Amino acid sequence: MRAEVGAGHQVTGLVDSSTLKPLPRRFYDRDPRRVAPDLLGKLLLRRTTAGLIGGRIVETEAYLGENDPAAHAAAGRTARNEVLFGPPGYAYVYFIYGNHYCLNVSCLPEGNAGCVLFRAFEPLHGIGEMSKNRGLIELPQRPATLRMLASGPGRLCEALAITRVSDNGKDLTGASDLFIADDGFAAPKVAATPRVGITKAASERLRYVIVGNPFVSGKRVRS
DNA sequence: TTATAGATTGCCT
DNA sequence: GGCAATCTATAAT
């Protein structure tokens, strides 16, 4: 039997949003292989006119910059990826497969193009608003349908209404509407697995998940 | 200028 | 489990 959703995960409950402050820039001024696992358990949030929406990050991937063949930065600096080469803590949003956006945060100092891809979060705030953004008519009640909100990088962006035009280059550490916060929750157990959906450097274990969390994308988490 | 692969998702069998 | 959708960046003519 699968554990009840939320049990063991929504430990801290819903924190007063006014107390949540963005993680500082220095958090991102490190190797993405450290930033990515450290982001697990943090909150990815957006302030909207309908209130606070988002949830707890449960899955991330590290991309290492120009020397990582799977990274967008591998081709060098272009108009598309220039945010990656800038200072840490900024949103890099790109459009993929003609259908979906993906959200990353730049890491390391200016000139270094490392980043972390956000792949999934556990919905906590604004379930109704995020359902609307995802085009879901009825509010999800069961784990299986709650997973449809933000388990996967494309779904995650749609749930938060993230697009390249509106969010690429946005400072995630400042007073912008999009930010990442620490509410004190600590991920019980973290695992590193191969990255998803890539063909180059596919054997590198640079995908990080909260072990056993039902909101991780894909079918099953390897431990 | 044309071709192709892509850090995905959802619908079909 | 297979594959179409749909568009963009980049490689190939």
Image: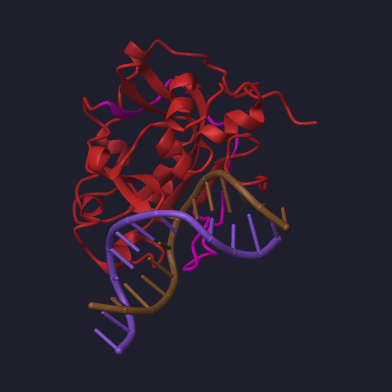
Chain colours: A red, B brown, C purple
User: In the current view of this chain or complex, which residue is farthest to the right?
Assistant: A1
Is A31 placed left or right of A138 in the picture? Answer: left
Range of the magenta residues? A177-206
Q: Residue at x 50, y 67 (%)?
A: A199
Q: Residue at x 19, y 51 (%)?
A: A110
Is A14 placed left or right of A25 in the picture? Answer: right
Residue A38, position in %: x, y? Answer: 44, 38
* Residue A204 magenta-highlighted: yes
Is A11 placed left or right of A116 in the picture? Answer: right
Q: Quadrant of residue A103?
A: top left
Residue A4, position in %: x, y? Answer: 70, 23
Name the image quarter holding the N terminus of chain A.
Answer: top right
Residue A207, position in %: x, y? Answer: 51, 50
Residue A29 at least partly seen: no
Per the picture, the main secondary structure of the magenta-coloured stretch is loop
Q: Quadrant of residue A75?
A: bottom left
Q: Quadrant of residue A53?
A: top left
* Residue A220 magenta-highlighted: no
Count numbered badges in the picture.
0
